[in-house]
Amino acid sequence: MSHRVALRFHDDDRGKPVVGIADTASALNPCNIGFSRLIPEVERGIRDAGGVPARFPVMSLGEDLMKPSAMLYRNLVAMELEETVRANPLDGVVYLANCDKSVPASIMAAVTTNLPSLLLLGGARSAPHFDGKPLGTGTDLWRALDKRRAGRMDDADWLGLERTLACAGPGACNTMGTASTMAIMTEVLGMSLPGTAGLAAIGDELVAAAYETGVAVTTAILRDERPDVRLTQIALDNAVRALAAVAGSTNAIIHLAAIAGRLGLDAGLARMDHLWRDIPLLADVEPSGTGLIHDFRRDGGVPSLVAAMGDQFDTTALAGDGETWAVAVAAAPEPSGVIHTRANPVAAGPTLAAVFGSLAPTGAVIKTAAATPSLIIHTGRAIVFDDYADMRERLDDPGLDVDANDVIVVRNCGPAGVPGMPEWGMAPIPKRLVEQGVTDMVRISDGRMSGTSFGTVVLHVSPESAVGGPLGLVEDGDLIELDVPGRRLGLLVDDDELERRRALAHPSPPRHLRGWPKIYAEHVQQAPDGCDLDFLAALTPESRRFIEPVVGRS
Ligand code: FES
């Protein structure tokens, strides 16, 4: 009875399932602010399907504002959601998520608590025109930044760009950045309704999807359909392949590994690289293509992409509506526009690759689709920056001894090192070289880069330098060999010399972290394991039992 009183149940609500709505709307997160408009529709869908809605607030992870990175807080939100769901009498949950890290955090919580649930993504922001073309969030800003640094963009144009960006309204980045990529991953994994990835944040279609999501979760509760039925190794492998087909954000590699870790599934780099090898680029969307996520959705979205992938996608996996993907594909438009067929791909694969070697013993990744083809086999002199601050201070120094064949190394950007593994991996091209017309160089880091970024950038080098990885031993002038076709990343320095350097290396001075960053730095796993906390990653039968008995109908 106390549950019913606390939830303000009417008499005719007795016995109905209680459906939580995890609300991440926040004025500090423009990507998620639009949920305020959608919540009444989710509630209406829940009620119409026979449930009782219960909205609750959740920390909002906005990539634009949070420092050093919203990634530092992904696991915290996953934990907040898990504990809220575990501690309250909920029967199912609609997770409202949109900006990059709120999506994987919600999936991690959903698969851990394993209550009937779906995510409702908040849609993509609009694309106001600038310089005669629709503005792709992030990607076009990076391009403009290089023009600005090269002196080819004056103050008036720069201000015009800022004003245009500010007019884009609510919603997630509209290129194939991390948010769009994770929206696609969510849909492929069966954790959102089919056809919803890439909807416009301000359109009526998203309002309808909000209602349908409320209905679908309530229906799933009544049928006792839980995420573990959908999120199998087959579904995960589908997601890994779909990631390559859209040349999605490298951040999704980490998030998929974290989700796999919660479920005891395999999303190791070797398996992913194997799955990526024969997948061509099928989505012509920035930064690896020309369109925006609106175009992708207009041309059929994920169901048409799955159709285009043919036998590279196992359609026996379940979509978010509880039907197999074969059903969604049968109703999907033929691939067209920015969604290409395998017979006529945007580019040959692989679009992503994992590399291993003396510089990355447990792996690193590169988005080959966004790299310069002539640089994917390259040996060059290392120009080493000890951390992000060092890079910012010295990169544009006219006296820096650097040329276009060098390899820029930025270290101490990893999960434990910062902590939080910020998107510092795409170091800018040194200004002197930009002015000479250089547009790309090999860059190597133990950090991440934005999904909207591009270039020949090797990321997630593991183990990271802050925990003793060999990236910490590189010195200016060492030769580094990148061989993407051979899947190698080597430091061409002999073992004796590396041992000598290791013996001389000074441990980093102790950092005076407190609160969450302290817990995070002490427990975060490396990138190939998804950067989850070690005590959250492995769900044992005992910890599963700890979660399950607490939830239940009121
Ligand atoms: Fe939020 Fe890109 S900054 S989705």
Image (spheres, grey):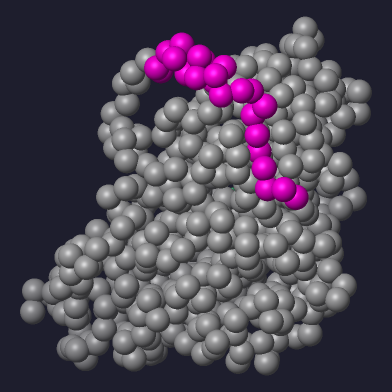
Residue 267 at x, y = what percent?
50, 61
User: Would residue 205 be seen by someone viewing this image from the given angle?
Assistant: no
* Residue 288, visible in the rendered structure: yes
- The reply, left or right, for residue 314 in relation to residue 436 is left
Residue numbers of the magenta segment: 485-508
Quadrant of residue 467 within the rendered picture: top left
Residue in view at x 47 percent, y 87 percent: 322
Residue that protrudes farthest toward the left in the picture: 1
Would you identify the image quadrant in which residue 295 lies? bottom right
User: Is residue 399 or residue 490 the one in the foreground?
Assistant: 490
Q: In this view, does 146 lie to the left or right of 118?
A: right
Question: Between residues 355 and 448, which one lies in front from this camera angle?
Answer: 355
Q: Which residue is the extreme one toward the top?
A: 399
- Residue sitting at 91 percent across and 28 percent down? 437
Name above or below for residue 83 compared with residue 485.
below
Q: In which quarter of the image is the N terminus?
A: bottom left
The percent coordinates of residue 148 (x first, y second) are: 81, 28
For residue 438, which quarter of the picture? top right
